[in-house]
Structure formats: structure tokens, C-alpha cells
Amino acid sequence: EVQLVESGGGLIQPGGSLRLSCAASGFTVSSDYMSWVRQAPGKGLEWVSLIYSGGNTYYADSVKGRFTISRDNSKNTVYLEMNTLRAEDTAVYYCSRRGNGGRAFDLWGQGTLVIVSS
Amino acid sequence: DIQMTQSPSSVSASVGDRVTITCRASQGISSWLAWYQQKPGKAPKLLIYAASSLQRGVPSRFSGSGSGTDFTLTISSLQPEDFATYYCQQANSFPYTFGQGTKLDTK
């Protein structure tokens, strides 16, 4: 079955660090473009980051310099390393795959909740 | 950054109605536009990619049109399972951006 499963969310204090994981099955993350999208409570969707199959990475201005997207091909897993967390980073973080058609996100995980609070 | 503006922000409709949602980009994005449906507590679901291509498995009552800066999502005959929030998203350039969402609820 083709799916994405996120993990690693939780409650973290402001200024802290957290690493989210996204385990893929049914396809190979190194062959696809993988992304993170977040959604603050009661708010809309916000694109966070993307990693190309070739390894190039892109970030939203709001997380640039604080978040790092990476992948482990041997584990078929994508990561989001989040540092210097702020209250405004509180959100459900979704892992997604950018499909071949139209650069759209055709596969999504169930999401993992990150709460940044003291 | 490219701003995506959806209208309306919310709409009330009945089963069987035809519903149209619009999305405007602050600059031209060719046809690099997608539409998603999201239900409470669930991940978004891709409906339309490349402005007008129907994602596999999505009912044909959903359709998309437009190019450049103005786009529309149309539901030809609303079904009970279509009540949800809809988002557009541009993939013309980084950073990718989403519209603010349109909540479709029952009249």
C-alpha cells in the first residue's frame, strides 16, 4: 500500500528542537519530491519545505534557517529537523509527495501535532 | 511571494446545487494550480492538478478551469460528502502558497 506515516510530534518549549519523521511505503522517497505542509489550529494550510529527488531543498521564509528537510534513502524516510521553535510553529505537520502531474501533492500522511508552549 | 486569494471564504449550498469557487493569483502562474478538499481532522485530498486535470479516483462532478491568474473549481451537483473546506495552491514558484480556504456547508 502506498502511504506516508508521520511521527515525532509533541509538546516542546519555545526555543527547543524537534525532529519529525515521515516513513514512506509503496514507493521510493529518493525518486520523488517530498514536502512538509503545516496547519495551525483552526487555520489554513501553509507550505513549509520541499526536497527534490536530486537533493535540492526549499523553504518557506517563516522557517528558513531554523528548519531542515532531509531524507534517509535506506529507511525510505523523510525528516524535518525543527530548531529554535516558536509558539507560531504550533501546528499539525503533514508529510506529502509531489506527484508527477502538475506539481501537486497527491499523497498525504495523517499528520503529527507539534505544540510549542511553556 | 505569490498571494492566492479565494472567494468566497464560505458558501452555503444544498445537495444537488452547482457550486463555484474562485482563486486568484497575485501574478501569473500558468496552469500550475491545484485544488484540495479537506474534512475536519483529516489530511487534504487532491482533487484537481494542472488547473483542470482530474485526479484519479475523484468524481467527475468536480472540474477545474483557468490559467494565468484566475481559476475556478466547480462542483456540478453537490453531494452530501462534498461539504468540506477547499483550498487552491500554486506551484509555479517557491515558496508554494495556498489560498485561505473556502468552507462549504449545508444551507
Image (tube, coloured by chain):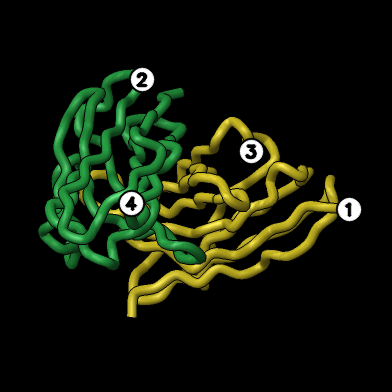
Image quadrant in which you'd find residue A8: bottom right
Residue A77 locus on image (x, y percent)? 51, 67
Q: Find residue A21 and name its label.
A: none
Q: Which residue is mark 3?
A: A63
Chain identity for the colour yellow used in the image: A
> Which amino acid, by three-letter code, is at mark 4?
Tyr
Of the numbered discs 3 and 1, the one sitting upstream in the chain is 3
Furthest toward the top, the residue is B27
Image quarter in which the N terminus of chain A is found:
bottom left
Q: Nearer the viewer, mark 4 or mark 3?
A: 4
Residue A43 locus on image (x, y percent)? 56, 46
| Secondary structure under the numbered disc 1 in the rendered image | loop
Residue in front for this viewpoint, A13 or A4: A13
Q: Which residue is mark 4?
A: B36
Q: Which residue is mark 1?
A: A118
Q: Nearer the viewer, mark 3 or mark 1?
A: 1
Instruction: State the separation of the CA atoms marked 3 and 1.
Output: 20 Å
Kindly check if marks 1 and 4 are in contact, taking CB atoms under 8 A apart as contact. Answer: no
**At x 70% / y 40%, what residue is drawn?**
A66
Residue B35 locus on image (x, y percent)? 29, 47
